[in-house]
Amino acid sequence: MRQARPSDVRWSTANEITFIRKLGSHVNPLYYPYNSAKVSRMTLLNGYIEGAKLRDDWGHINSKACIAYAKNELLRLKEEG
């Protein structure tokens, strides 16, 4: 059985932006029982933006809108200091 590709699934731009908005908002206690390895939201957003450059199948997702959203979130965090 072939694995589903993004173009096969109805994952929307709104779903992707919700995913980006929640980046860094929780930690799985099974992997990080003491929160010592929690990755910062800035690091995760940077990783998302860098990884987006390598993503070849966006399916039904507007890649430009999602990347712009992630960049704006990163800029907002930097401005908040």
Image: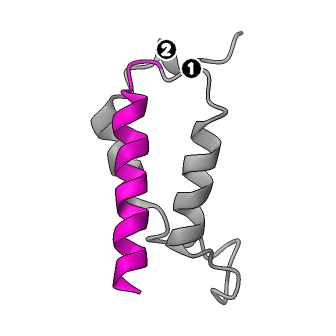
Q: How many marks?
A: 2
Q: Residue at x 42, y 54 (%)?
A: 71
Q: Separation of disc 2 and disc 1 at Cα? A: 7 Å
Is residue 71 one of those drawn in magenta?
A: yes
Screen quadrant of the C terminus: bottom left
Q: Which residues are magenta?
A: 59-81
Q: Amino acid at mark 2?
A: Ser
Secondary structure under the numbered disc 2 in the rendered image: helix
Residue occupied by mark 2: 7
Local packing at callout 1 (Cα closer than 10 Å; few below 14, some 14-19, many 20+) is few
Compared to residue 37, the image places residue 1 above or below, namely above
> 78 or 17: nearer the eye?
78
Mark on residue 57? 1
Q: Position of residue 3 (x, y in %)?
A: 67, 18
Q: Residue at x 62, y 30 (%)?
A: 55
Secondary structure under the numbered disc 1 in the rendered image: loop
**Mark 2 near mark 1, Cβ–Cβ under 8 Å?**
yes
Compared to residue 16, the image places residue 29 above or below, namely below
Q: Earlier in the sequence, mark 2 or mark 1?
A: 2
Q: Position of residue 76 (x, y in %)?
A: 34, 70
Compared to residue 50, the image places residue 40 above or below, namely below
Q: Amino acid at mark 1?
A: Asp
Q: Residue at x 71, y 9 (%)?
A: 1
